[in-house]
Amino acid sequence: MTRTPAPLADRVDVLRDEVLDTAERGDRDPPGAEIFEAIVRQLAALGDSAGHGGLDLTLHDALARRLAWGDTEEVLLGDADRVFERLVKACARGLRDPEEQAAVLETASDVLTAAARIVALAAVGRAGRDRSARLREEMAQRRLRDALHEQAQTLARLEQEVKESGL
């Protein structure tokens, strides 16, 4: 009886602890887990006849959530880079077939490119919101200065009228 090899996504998923460095960091939400999981999802989709290839909404949501919780774009991209570096080493040790290694690395580079695009778009959006908020603040400060200047003029005029009326 011949044994059929496990699908590539399953064999890469076995490398999870090594790639995410869970021995060092622990298994609870390791940095870059969303990247690794997106790679495994993409590898699983390679076998589908429908194919995946589109935007990974799960990856998008995970990265957006990390940004919302205060991680910077630099941290997210650094985590993705470290996952890729460890994946390259793990695949060299764990996968013997060069074609499989190439498929994993190509898929990983596609996922990292998508992650970089998601992070870049989030950064551009945040920069636009920051600029708008700064402009609103500057306009509010200008209106406040104008109101204070107008009040000072009104007070000066009233003081002058009081002096002139002799009250």
Image (spheres, helix red, strand yellow):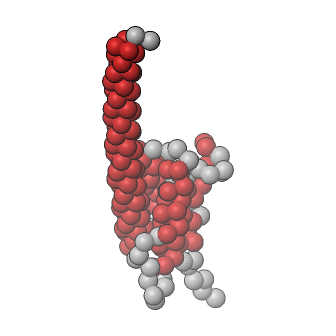
- Left or right position of 95 against 10: left
Between 103 and 109, the one lying in front of the other is 109
Q: Quadrant of residue 96?
A: bottom left
- Towards the viewer: 105 or 42: 42
- Measured from the top left, where is residue 61 in percent x and y? 52, 62
State the count of labels: 0
Does residue 86 lie above or below 152 as drawn? below
Residue at point 57% right, 72% down?
10
Q: Position of residue 11 (x, y in %)?
A: 55, 69
The answer to whether one can see residue 100 in this image is no
Q: Quadrant of the N terminus?
A: bottom right
Q: Is residue 1 left or right of residue 52?
A: right
Of residues 28 and 143, the one nearer the viewer is 143
Is residue 103 shown left or right of residue 16?
left
Does residue 155 sit above or below 34 in this rendering? above
Question: What residue appears at the point 57 percent right and 83 percent down from the top-left corner?
Answer: 4
Query: At x 48% / y 83%, what residue is drawn?
Result: 47
State which quadrant residue 24 falls in. top right
Asked whether the viewer can see residue 22, the reply is yes
Q: Quadrant of the C terminus?
A: top left
Position of residue 125 measured from the top left corner of the image (x, y, whole percent): 38, 54
Q: Residue at x 57, y 59 (%)?
A: 16
Position of residue 165 measured from the top left corner of the image (x, y, whole percent):
38, 15
